[in-house]
Amino acid sequence: MASTPTNHRPVQSKTEIKIPLKKEEIHISKEPYIKEEIIIKKKPVVETRTVSEEVKSEKIRVKENMKGEEREYS
C-alpha cells in the first residue's frame, strides 16, 4: 500500500483521541396533488306520488288573532 501525504498532524496525546462522528437523518413529507378531476352536476327531478290511506283522526289548528294564538280542534 502506498501512503499518501496528509495535512493532519500526528496524535499529541496518548490518552485522548477525538474522532468526529456523523449521522444521517431521514426527512419524510407528504404533499397532496391533483390526480383526477370530476364534474358533479345536479338535475332537478319532479316526482308525483298518489298515496291512499284511511284517516283515523283529524286535528285542525286555527289562528284566531294577530298575536298568533292558536286553537286546536279534534
Image (cartoon, rainbow, N blue to C red):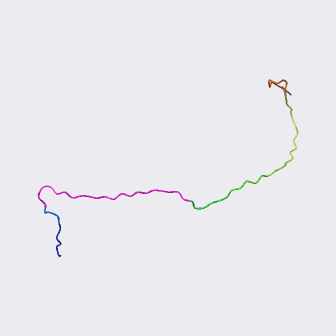
Quadrant of res 10: bottom left
Residue at screen point 16% across, 57% down: 17
Left or right placement of residue 36 versus residue 42 in this view: left
Magenta stretch contains residue 31: yes
Residue at screen point 87% across, 41% down:
53
User: Please, which residue is most extreme toward the bottom here?
Assistant: 1
Q: Quadrant of residue 29?
A: bottom left
Q: Is residue 73 left or right of residue 38?
A: right
Q: Main secondary structure of the magenta part?
A: loop
> Is 59 positioned to the left or the right of 26 in the image?
right
In the rendered image, residue 26, in percent from the top left (x then y), is placed at 38, 58
Q: The C terminus lies in which quarter of the figure?
A: top right
Of residue 58 and residue 34, the one placed in the foreground of this image is 34
Magenta residues?
A: 11-33
Residue 15 location in percent, x, y? 12, 55
Which quarter of the figure is the N terminus placed in?
Answer: bottom left
Quarter of the rendering containing residue 67: top right
Residue at 33% across, 59% down = 24
| Residue 4 on image: x %, y % | 18, 72
| Tally of numbered discs | 0
